[in-house]
Amino acid sequence: MASLITLRLLGAPLRKNLTVCRTLPVIASFSSSKQLQLKQIIHKTEGNVTTIEGVHIPSPRENNVIPEKYFSKPTACPLCRLNLKVKYTDVLIISQFVDAYGKLLPQHVTKLCNRQHKHMNMLVNFATRAGLLRSLAPTGPDGKSNYIPPYKYLKYNVHYVKAPKRH
């Protein structure tokens, strides 16, 4: 499985606050128990013949490893491949697809399929309206954070009774 990893090179800045980013392919970012199978070595001695046999045993971490069937479809988007059901309260997952202004990143950056991109856009809106995602603009030239306060009607907690309709 070929995936991408981003390395930030801190040596040569192009402009004042801009650093060079390079994307490199990674051949194996996860290792499954298939590559590192555990074997039990059995010594058998029958007369003058000694047989040494390696028998595969199941890994004790087998339930903690991501199954190989999720890596078999490299073209599927990350959320479809892992079959994740993301809700608007899963702020840590949603924040990975959001830029500094609180807007959803473009589809060619996130590598989400059309269905998941629409769904993630809806979840970002729900989480922002519920007050779970702060609208924070990047820091200004004076070094202060440009916090965008919520509207007055958002000062109370918002809870959606039903899960949003999936696209």
Image: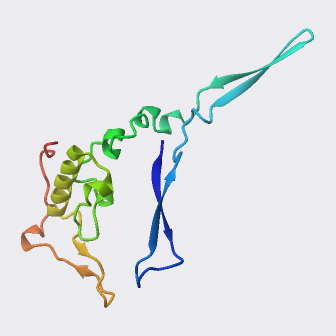
Identify the residue at horizontal 22%, vertical 52% (top origin). 120
Identify the residue at horizontal 51%, vertical 48% (top origin). 29
Above/below status of 78 relative to 144: above
Q: In this view, does 109 lie to the left or right of 59?
A: left
Q: In this view, does 29 lie to the left or right of 157?
A: right
Above/below status of 50 relative to 124: above
Q: In this view, does 82 lie to the left or right of 147?
A: right
Residue positioned most to the left = 153
Quadrant of residue 125 in the image? bottom left
Query: Residue 20: image x %, image y %?
Result: 46, 72
Residue positioned most to the front = 14
Q: Is residue 166 left or right of residue 79?
A: left
Residue positioned most to the top = 47
* Most foreground residue, 159 or 141: 141
* Most foreground residue, 141 or 1: 1
* Most foreground residue, 73 or 121: 73
Identify the residue at horizontal 47%, vertical 56% (top origin). 5
